[in-house]
Image (cartoon, rainbow, N blue to C red):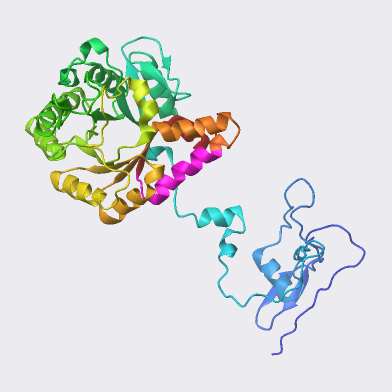
Amino acid sequence: MASTIVNVGPIQGLDYVGLRPAKPLKLNSGRIQIKTRPQRLFTVRASDGDGPIGKTRLSDAECEAAVVAGNAPHAPPAPPKPAAPAGTPVVSLLPINRRPRRNRRSPALRSAFQETSLSPANFVYPLFIHEGQEDTPIGAMPGCYRLGWRHGLVEEVSKARDVGVNSIVLFPKVPDALKNSTGDEAYNDNGLVPRAIRLLKDKYPDLVIYTDIALDPYSSDGHDGIVREDGVILNDETVHQLCKQAVAQARAGADVVSPSDMMDGRVGAIRTALDAEGFQHVSIMSYTAKYASSFYGPFREALDSNPRFGDKKTYQMNPANYREALIEAREDESEGADILLVKPGLPYLDIIRLLRDSSPLPIAAYQVSGEYSMIKAGGVLKMIDEEKVMMESLMCLRRAGADVILTYFALQAARSLCGEKR
């Protein structure tokens, strides 16, 4: 039996938009008869009117029958090719198959193909604390304070948690009267850092607290270790003190202890000491590649911990060295480090990438005080866009391979990521 197809053409003289049902019409398709309605041709324009396009109340079968009958609704025409400015030369297309710009031509495509992400969970927020009740501004670090450990510290942690930053690292400003040549205050169970840890854990049990393991905040000499009378930093004797400091901080509730001293063998000794005291669950973030950098100046002002004499070049790494970082990383891995840290951050992206490619452990980067203060100063002087440079610098650290970033921008950057105003 021959099939008969009824062609329903456009109805002239109608200027409304949309498929409108008229009187019923039978389409004989041979074996099956489909009842449908003659359709009026229309053009769909998503931008017409202020509201959504009205539905026609046609069934799927009726819509498909209209298309089969050649009465598909018209969509808007393709947009015209944008014109080049006057004077643009007419050239033959380059004979290239690969044009990487195709994947960058719109925000949606750029977002879809972005290789590196940045979130507040990637930040560890360094916080300076002191015995006072008031928060004291740090002149060389705009926006940073020595926080009173009972009030200002708790408030700052609350602000950070509100925007997804749930990891902090504590640095104490210790009274001069408590400092001595062997840094004994470092392992006082009722010292500033253990008290602050207990206070924070009482209020925020799930807060991840990193602590600094080094003697310089507690030393009358301002060095990371015990200084012999001829100026030599004693290694093994210093490690003995660091182990007691790590245990005291773990006892207070620290989640991650972070030896920043750069003494040889300290990671293994600290791991043994922690395990012996029942703190197998406490992690070690080793300052694996800590360079003798000039970017630390503002930090030392914050803690009043400048060396009383000399420098730290006999234990911190030479900024000219690259392969040496591998030696430090292999030692720290073998001794039981859980996280490897590079300090400073942005000037040492090559070292971050080196450790990322050579170690399966998480990699941390410390965007240090000098990096922070330079961006702040450039923003104040209107030489750079502070917000954009801040976010770019953090993204670069992530791209180089850092899993977590210690940064004084943690709160500000997290607010930016969450869409808040500064």
Q: Nearer the viewer, residue 147 or 218?
A: 218
> Quadrant of residue 254 in the image?
top left
Does residue 420 appear in this view? no
Q: Is residue 201 visible?
A: yes
- Residue 143 is left or right of residue 265, and the answer is right
Where's residue 328, x and y in %? 21, 46
Compare residues 119 and 375 and report the one nearer the observer: 375
| Quadrant in which the N terminus is drawn | bottom right
Query: What residue lies at 13% left-to-right and 37% top-to-bottom?
Result: 271
Q: Is residue 393 magenta?
A: yes
Return the x and y of residue 290 as percentages of the image width and height.
28, 39
Answer with left or right where residue 206 lies relative to residue 278. right
Q: Is residue 314 above or below residue 214?
A: below
Q: Position of residue 196 (x, y in %)?
A: 28, 19
Write down the quadrant of residue 263 in the picture: top left
Instruction: Please state the extent of the stretch shown in magenta in the rendering.
Output: 388-403
- The correct choice, above or below, for 179 with respect to 98 in the image is above
| Vertical relation: 36 (above or below) 340 | below
Q: 165 left or right of 176?
A: right
Which residue is painted at 36% across and 29% down in the image?
126
Residue 146 percent coordinates (x, y): 38, 18
- Who is closer to the viewer here, 284 or 262? 262
Question: Measuring 25% from the left and 33% from the top, which residue is drawn there?
Answer: 312
